[in-house]
Image (cartoon, helix red, strand yellow):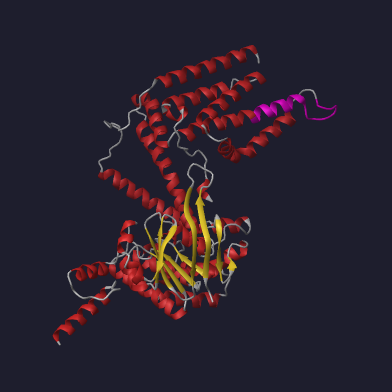
Amino acid sequence: MAEIITEKLSHVYSAGTPFESTALHDVSISIPQGQFAAVIGHTGSGKSTFIQHLNALLQPTEGRVLLDGQDINNDKYTRRDVKWKVGLVFQYPEYQLFEETVYKDIAFGPSNMKLSKEEIDERVREAAAFTGVSEELFERSPLELSGGQKRRIAIAGVIAMRPEILILDEPTAGLDPAGCAQIFENIRSYREKSGATVLIVSHSMDDVARLAERIIVFDRGTVVMDDTPASVFSRAKELMEIGLNVPKAAELAVALRDRGIGLPEGIFTHERLLAALLQLREGRKC
Amino acid sequence: MLRDVTLGQYFPGNTVVHRLDPRTKILLVVIYIIALFQAQGWISYGLVTLVTLVCMALSKIKPSSMFKGVKPMLFIIVLTALLNIFYTEGTPIRPGWIITWEGIARAVQMMLRIILLISGTFLLTYTTSPIALTDGLEMLLSPLKKLKVPVHEMTMMMSMALRFIPTLIAETDKIMSAQKARGADFETGSLIQRAKALLPILVPLFVSAFKRADELAVAMESRCYHGGEGRTRMKQLIMQRRDTIALVLGLLFLTAMIVLKRVGL
């Protein structure tokens, strides 16, 4: 269905001025339908620039972006239509809320798609349900709600377009742990029910480790690693060198292993670490 | 994209023009403007153009970035030229035509005057950082403090406004991208539709601008900011020899222009 491919993608900002800078260099990646992938990298590593290419907000300086085998930058119309298929939630999306009511704000995306009123209504309610925005809030002004609520409304505004590929840039930045957990749960349930591809940008390794099937690591505009979480986090030293860290559980597992506790390889979530430790204790009892 | 806005934007560099004291540069621009308005004949226009080109070459500003600054004024420039062509009396270029030789000459001079005016002032903002510019302005205006004019507050407001232009541009860019990602269309439709399409940008922009202003005020107060009285600065402005030379050259230029005007060239 919706496979997104980038071919030798490069992007240069402010080309030809003293402020010229290369944000992306030769990025070739393919993300199949339904995958839950994470993009990680230090600030300025090009990850935000990269995701803005996937829905044609930015046009590549060189290279192509293909959605289902079609170049999304072909013409003005494909550039606009691709935005329904590839939903992009920006960092701190609550700053984009502008309508008088929560309902109208969530409906902004679908109404730009020129859908019927009933269809819009259905999508707004569906998106609100996915993100845990209660219908009681629909007539309130989005500006008077709490930060976590605003964030979920903004995400609902993108989900209401029913994107086949959902991209989120740091969806949990600045939220408390409970708020983070809730947002991740919302994203997980949307993916489960719609079968959408999800691409998440984050530098919280713990979250990424728990959710993603694949991790793409950016450093200075290029992809330096692209693998399963298990193999990416086994290269802890390299991650550290480019200013990233490994999940706390993985760090702890390495430390325990060093002290002679026979833990298996590939532990990078709290749950798995706990399970492995319990299993070890069981083994000793017998 | 908005990223490419260069109107009055500072281009970092290390040329003689960049290193001049901001006070010198402000004074030179004032001298330059007065001199420009002395120009009447072709010789004096030629001299101003030459001086402008030399300054541009010294500052290593590309003519293309200069042109970008002039572009928004193109309409006014052309309009002035047209008015001058049609409304100047003199000898018609052909018998019976309204267009006169004098009109054409005036139109060209007027265009030249506006373009030189813009280029000269842009040269100042292109080569001087906003902070240096307001510092220089504050010091130049400081005699007015005796008359209870709040010079410091005014320049502080100015430097803050300048400081936040790039921030607001970046913010606008971000909000625009976010709304575009939700399918907002800013490029097509009638004028009214397009004006309406700006609402999803303006509302969040104002909300965040007010929030930011509030935060800035709190941050300044918590660092005990209380206006200009008794404030010292980290970077003292000191006049160098090159500043004296530049000012002398500037005054010589002005004198030359006045003399040329008297002679009627």
Residue A101's place in the image compared with B138, above or below, is: below
- Residue in the foreground of this view, choosing between A156 and A173: A173
User: Does B94 appear in magenta?
Assistant: yes
**Residue B150 in view of the camera:** no
Q: Position of residue B139 (x, y in %)?
A: 37, 27
Q: Quadrant of residue A241?
A: bottom left
Q: Position of residue A161 (x, y in %)?
A: 51, 71
Q: Quadrant of the C terminus of chain A?
A: bottom left
Q: Quadrant of residue B260?
A: top right
Q: Residue furthest left?
A: A285
Counting every numbered tag in the picture gives 0
Residue visible at 56% across and 72% down in the picture: A68
Left or right of residue A278: residue B79: right
- Residue in the foreground of this view, choosing between B205 and A48: A48
Q: Position of residue B146 (x, y in %)?
A: 34, 24
Residue B187's place in the image compared with A286, above or below, is: above
Q: Quadrant of the N terminus of chain A?
A: bottom right
- Residue in the foreground of this view, choosing between B160 and A166: A166
**Residue A116 in view of the camera:** yes
Left or right of residue B45: residue A248: left
- Residue in the foreground of this view, choosing between B178 and A103: B178
Residues shaded magenta: B92-111
Residue visible at 45% across and 67% down in the picture: A167
Residue A216's place in the image compared with B249, above or below, is: below
Left or right of residue B129: residue A175: left
Q: Position of residue B169 (x, y in %)?
A: 47, 49
